[in-house]
Amino acid sequence: MDNKFKITKKAGIYGIIGNIFLLLIKALVGFISKSQAMIADSVNSAGDIFASLMTFIGNKIASTPNDEDHNLGHGKAEYIFSMFISISMILVSAKLLYDSIITLILGSMLKFSWFLVIVCILTIITKLALYIYTKKAYEKYNNILLEASMKDHKNDCIITLFTLISILLTLFDIYWFDSIVGIGISIWICYTGVTIFMESYNVLMDISVDDTTKSNILDICHTYTEIKKVEDIISTPVGDRYLVFITIHLDGNMSTFESHKLADNLEKDVNKLENIYKTVVHVDPI
């Protein structure tokens, strides 16, 4: 199995274990203390377990080699399952927003507890460790499932920090901030979910390579003086890389052997680009 898939599998397993631990202690302490922010945080951890599970399953499918039915492999599974993650985040955020607004209107019943403070600190330490591990893996392998998990862990660190602040403020009889934090958490989760959804949607709808990559492909084509014109550069995503189709015009007097050799060399050069999965060059004589 490719190192990319091994690391993503580990990230998913670590995420599941860490989030189950956090869910249990957050839910227990949150309901006992009646902290809306902590309850919101515990629901967020439940969503994180689902996200980590989707990362694990999506990565397992995406790592399956290409076969007769799937000639280009199963890379798009990463984006399908990252879309599941994003939808779960949006649904969770809607429920949290509703509960937090109701609590803000009716009043908070939060009771200060040092257990709340300890849970927040444990959460921040756990999530920071998961974030650092996943961030390093994402920077190395550029996997959208790792990106989704990384953003989720980072969000949790920020969310729990504000939860901690809202708890400490109750020492000064400031209770409304707890509900405000709950509202802020829900909006933040929704924003992150929408961002991941759009990135996954674009890939599944066969978005083209970015302008920089397209410019790099053109630069490679222009190094061949025999190419009279580059007519088309068409691309489609394959996992986190792209399948590229290039149509070039060559002198009609060039032999078939020479034109095919040039096309083969061009394909090899373009394939050297980091985010290119495979290149197919079509030759038109002029």
Image (cartoon, rainbow, N blue to C red):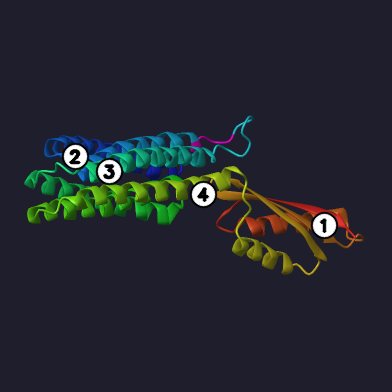
- Dot 4 alpha-carbon crowd within 10 angstroms: few under 14, some 14 to 19, many 20 or more: some
- Residue receiving disc 1: 259
Q: Upstream in the sequence, badge 2 or badge 4?
A: 2
CA–CA distance between discs 4 and 3?
A: 29 Å
CA–CA distance between discs 2 and 3?
A: 17 Å
Tell whether label 4 touches label 2 (CB within 8 Å): no
Q: Quadrant of the C terminus?
A: bottom right
Viewer-closest of 233 and 268: 233
Element on which disc 2 rests:
helix
- Dot 2 alpha-carbon crowd within 10 angstroms: few under 14, some 14 to 19, many 20 or more: many
Viewer-closest of 271 and 216: 216
The image quadrant of residue 213 is: bottom right
Q: Upstream in the sequence, badge 4 or badge 3?
A: 3
Residue type for callout 4: Glu
Visible residue check, residue 93? yes
Q: Residue furthest right?
A: 253
Tell whether label 3 touches label 2 (CB within 8 Å): no
Residue type for callout 2: Lys
Q: Upstream in the sequence, badge 2 or badge 1?
A: 2
Tell whether label 1 touches label 4 (CB within 8 Å): no
- Residue receiving disc 4: 199
- Dot 3 alpha-carbon crowd within 10 angstroms: few under 14, some 14 to 19, many 20 or more: many
For the record, the magenta segment spans 62-66
Element on which disc 1 rests:
helix
Q: Upstream in the sequence, badge 4 or badge 1?
A: 4
Residue type for callout 3: Ser
Visible residue check, residue 1? no
Residue 100 numbered mark, or none:
3
User: Would residue 63 be counted in the magenta stretch?
Assistant: yes
